[in-house]
Image (cartoon, coloured by chain):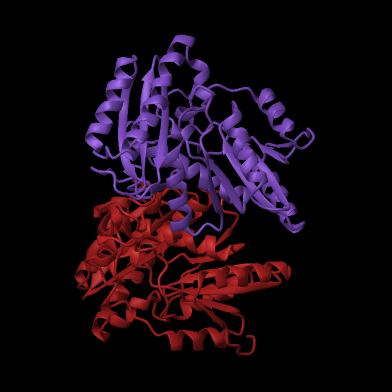
Chain colours: A red, B purple
Amino acid sequence: MAAPREPEVIRDKAAMRAWSRRRHAEGKAVAVVPTMGYLHQGHLSLVSAAAASADPVAIVVTIYVNPSQFAPTEDLATYPSDFAGDLRKLASTGVVDAVFSPPDLYDRGTGRRAAASGGGAISCLEEEAGDGHETWVRVEHLEKGLCGASRPVFFRGVATIVSKLFNIIEPDIAVFGKKDYQQWRIICRMVRDLDFSIEIIGSEIVREADGLALSSRNVHLSSEEREKALSISRSLVDARTAALKGNTDCKQIKNKIVQTLTETGGQVDYVEIVEQDSLVPVENIDGPVVICVAAWFGKVRLIDNIEINTRF
Amino acid sequence: MAAPREPEVIRDKAAMRAWSRRRHAEGKAVAVVPTMGYLHQGHLSLVSAAAASADPVAIVVTIYVNPSQFAPTEDLATYPSDFAGDLRKLASTGVVDAVFSPPDLYDRGTGRRAAASGGGAISCLEEEAGDGHETWVRVEHLEKGLCGASRPVFFRGVATIVSKLFNIIEPDIAVFGKKDYQQWRIICRMVRDLDFSIEIIGSEIVREADGLALSSRNVHLSSEEREKALSISRSLVDARTAALKGNTDCKQIKNKIVQTLTETGGQVDYVEIVEQDSLVPVENIDGPVVICVAAWFGKVRLIDNIEINTRF
């Protein structure tokens, strides 16, 4: 571990781009770790992956709760934040050079839309024409299933904000966590399809000792809910073990997971077994797949997944 | 006019990006002029605008007939091309450093979609999930009216290919013709909304001595159709003159243009009077607007427009 070092905090787009261009002029690669803050060990593992990605490398962590990926019904207002704590954690790694934390990255325009949107969720689909933000990047098939089914604006918001961050920071490398598996796949596809000159690193899920995948939203779980939520990772490991033993029928596997989650008090959003690259559901496991779960425990929606990389 | 000079022809994405980065390393700005080839004086005026945009500047002209902006019913197959002639014209300007003319810029994937799309139109909206191109940039309000109403995939294709070209070439400046007025406005909005670090220059329409706006598609007009098509520019100038004299009622102005075009044998797609920035239709002209026309003469769809910049 490097010695603690305060990252430079940058609030402004133009200053961010200038900073990044100076690092390039010094012959450094620039690696970005996009986050929404309230950092935990999972995020810090992304920072480690960034530190190992190139030499010499300048690391930028972005902290920005992106309003466009929240539907008006979702938890934008209660999304946890702790900027001072985040800075301390990043300083403790000793490898983060800058934190990009802008106040707002969307042009709200001057008309009625601007007044209506304020600093909150932004979604032009239902809004009128004008001079506000209306450009969206969509990865049209990958965005549809899994979390996209219950969160219709989510991946449009993610792909758009990541495009904006890429254009502002002009990184050579970007690191995403595989806990948000669909997001990672969508970003990889977007980078290929739009010819961004950026290497995407997918970083493995970080778990508590008892298996719970780290998430900023875990803070909202009561200790009882947290205990019950362990059924997610447990049922995923059990499913993987069963598949490797030859139980490859997806309907059976999914039913078992749904049953386990429901019995422990979870409310299942989805359980799906999909191809790793296309995220197309499969009926039987005969190649690399990922089992993806989203479930509510109390008022908290948790996601998790497990890859099966064997060819059967 | 500079002495004739052969531009370097680049076919490959990686070579194009490397070329552009070398120019940047030499301290030059890079200006791009995106075209679909079959170049005329209108395109060469864009090159002149690029040459005047920075000093020192390296100029790239792209020649690529973008399949994703054509619907299957449209004229992709008959779109005119003359690569050797284009190169001669660009060489004659003496200021073009490179021509980027790739064979195909879309990943067609490996599945059924790949077999079906071949080298032709590409549109994933109606296709199945897989590993082919599926990322699209949309400017959701500006893309809807005017040409977007009769050409539903057009601006999605334009915004997406321009994003790809921007990411491959990494230009500082890009020049677009105001003849494609809606396209120009869409690109400006996209650049703002996605934070591309690129200055967009809108270049004025170039006309024949008799008023006909230059277009690669003019080559398909018979001499009789060409004569009739002069009614487009004539009716636009008349409308502007009338508006400046105080006839600012849009319904009257539009009816007059439709009448003129129809009487000369044109089939009107649309006549609209819209705000210059938002492209929202207005009922009465009391600020900067643009009158936009699309009409068929024979089998050729022509577009034209005229700005009225006065505040009334």
Residue at screen point 57% across, 49% down: B166
Residue B310 x/y as whole percent: 38, 47
Residue B152 seen from this side: no
Q: Quadrant of the N terminus of chain B?
A: top right
Residue B71 x/y as whole percent: 40, 29
| Residue toward you, A185 or B311 | B311
| Residue toward you, A116 or B274 | B274
Q: With respect to residue B56, does B6 lie above or below? A: above
Residue A306 x/y as whole percent: 42, 63
Identify the image quadrant of residue B230.
top left
Residue at screen point 28% across, 81% down: A220
Residue at screen point 47% across, 76% down: A101
Q: With respect to residue B236, does A71 lie above or below? A: below
Residue B239 x/y as whole percent: 34, 32
Q: With respect to residue B261, does B312 lie above or below? A: below
Q: With respect to residue A267, does A274 lie above or below? A: above
Identify the image quadrant of residue B254.
top left
